[in-house]
Image (tube, grey):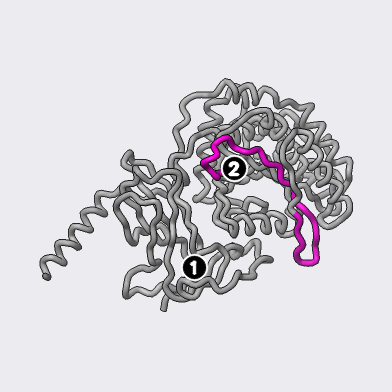
Amino acid sequence: MRNKIIGIFVGGILIIAGFTSIPIQAGPVQQPLTSSDPQIIDMIQQVDESLLYYYNTHLTAFGPHVTGTETSIKVSQYIYDEFRAMGMSVEFYNWTFDDLTDRNVVAILPGTDTSSNATFILCAHHDTVATSPGANDDGSGVAAVLAIAKILSHYSFNYTIRFITFSAEEERCYGSFLYARDASQQGDNIVAVIQADEIGYTDTTVGGLTLVFNCPERSKWIADFATTVNTLYRNQTNITVETDPNVMASDHQSFIDYGFDAVFPVQYDWPYPWGHSQNDTSDRLNWTYLTKATKLLLAVVAELASTPLELQMIITEPFQGYLYFFNHPLLPLNFWKRNYHCLRGTTFILGLANLYVDVIPSYNNIKYVLFCIDGNQIDWQTGAAPHYEWTIQMGPIYPIIGRHSVEVYAYTTSGKVASDEINVFLFTL
């Protein structure tokens, strides 16, 4: 019996040793991009300064539009009407929180793959501070979202695209936080979020040729994808991609907090001299730069929504932002004002709880799955299955106390890797 146990243990070690090393980040498995698409080139060429100028100047003409004010409602109505004129399905996402009431605007371009619920989001924020008309912050991002939506609305894509403008980015990102929280609780399959904020200013040669993608490690695959896309369409975009560590101070963080991958494209030259002031006006923007940035974002969104998804790992439980007692969700947690503390969406677990993972769209080519805590491999399961279940623990005699990242990686027979992760506070004593 003792020899049998030793044999099983050694065999397990050999299996682990044969596994590919754990990647820093993975994301979904997509078909590789190898060449540019003539149709996407045609889309890029439709982006011009006059279209962006039209949207930006109409937004700034409202003057400051602070969350919760009548002017903010007027701005959201203007954006709604523009989306409707494009022939897309549009809705208001109404919210009330912390004595504020306002609404986001959501336009939906449905995907043609009816077997998939995968969704990609391009977004910006339409609110401003009280002192500013917001030409760059974030009229530049909203203008880009509207221009891209107008162009893409004439085409079809495999996967659904949501074009969203958020209220209350300047108020602890309440608009995006509430939207991301609801999306998480509804089980929305949001594959990637691209949030454009302040993409219209440059005052250096290098800055005029660079768009920065801020992101955490879990979302770096989106920035890498953008780099690949830009390589294929560089003749059309005339810009480069720089990937920087995450900056939590905008709406993309709301999605990250609730377990979605998101990036924050922003201008290279910083700080913006007229930020949050009455001088943040349309004449301060570099329209050539904003046009290049918009072309790149269009290409990235179009390719994301077109490129087939071969494999996704989706953690379905524990739910984001809940208190658990063992496997029982007790109540949602109220850390909603802590947007700079990475507490929104964090799950607290008292005792041992199970991790539940779904595999879509197909699991047939999965070779094995690794379960990790803070990037360290803890356990594994071999074989292909549509669902996986694992008890979150370091081992039968090792308690876990504190904040941790729990990750799952699926390795395919062809060597590709898909992953998902969740942030939890664990108390397993």
Could you tell me residue 418's position as x and y percent? Answer: 42, 46
Residue drawn 49% across and 75% down? 325
Q: Quadrant of residue 401?
A: bottom left
Left or right: 52 in relation to 230? right
Which image quarter holds the N terminus?
A: bottom left
Query: Vertical placement of 190 versus 41: above or below?
Result: below
Determine which of the numbered discs, if any, sits on residue 395 in the image.
Answer: none
Could you tell me residue 164's position as x and y percent? Answer: 70, 45
Residue found at the very far front of the displayed protein = 114
What is the three-letter code of the residue carrying label 1?
Answer: Arg
Could you tell me residue 125's position as x and y percent? Answer: 73, 47
Task: Answer few, some or many: residues within 10 Å of disc 1's Cα (few below 14, many 20 plus, some between 14 and 19).
Answer: some
Left or right: 184 in relation to 92? left
**Helix, strand or loop status at disc 2:** strand
Left or right: 165 in relation to 220? right
Q: Nearer the viewer, residue 327 or 399?
A: 327
Q: Quadrant of residue 320?
A: bottom right
Q: Is residue 218 visible?
A: yes
Task: Answer few, some or many: residues within 10 Å of disc 2's Cα (few below 14, many 20 plus, some between 14 and 19).
Answer: many
Residue drawn 40% across and 66% down? 392
Determine which of the numbered discs, if any, sits on residue 403 in the image.
Answer: 1
Q: Is residue 25 visible?
A: no
Determine which of the numbered discs, if any, sits on residue 120 in the image.
Answer: 2
Stretch in magenta: 94-119
